[in-house]
Image (cartoon, rainbow, N blue to C red):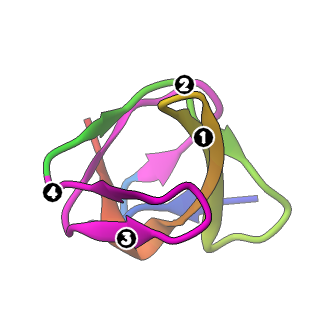
Amino acid sequence: MNVTDINGNSLHDGDSVKLIKDLKVKVAGITLKRGTVVKNIRITERLEKIDCKIKKANIVLRTEFDRKM
């Protein structure tokens, strides 16, 4: 499986990514600001999504909104 970020860089389990857009998370009731660094991501079965933990909430992010650090 080859999961890539917005720039085409390959992503792997344990990588860190930076958000490129403000994202509202309705379920958790938070807004993730652009530039937020997300550490220790996990690759999901879907190529366009990654799993991560932010502020004690498990969140699935689309790879089109992040870039590799």
Residue 52 circle label:
1
Residue 34 circle label:
4
Residue 24 circle label:
3
Residue 47: x, y in percent? Answer: 69, 70
Asked whether residue 6 is in view, the answer is no
Mark 4 element type: loop
Q: Nearer the viewer, mark 1 or mark 3?
A: 3
Amino acid marked by disc 1? Cys
Quadrant hosting residue 40: top right
* Image height of 23 relative to 55, above or below: below
Frontmost residue, 27 versus 6:
27
Q: Earlier in the sequence, mark 4 or mark 1?
A: 4
**In the image, residue 69 lies in the stretch drawn in magenta:** no
Residue 38: x, y in percent? Answer: 39, 35
Give the magenta-colored segment's residue range.
10-34
Asked whether residue 41 is in view, the answer is yes
How packed is label 4: few (under 14 Cα within 10 Å), some, or many (20 or more)?
A: some
Outermost residue on the left side: it is 35
Amino acid marked by disc 4? Arg
Outermost residue on the right side: it is 45
Residue under circle 2?
Answer: 40
The C terminus lies in which quarter of the figure? top left
- Spatial CA distance of label 4 from label 2 is 18 Å
Residue 42: x, y in percent? Answer: 68, 38
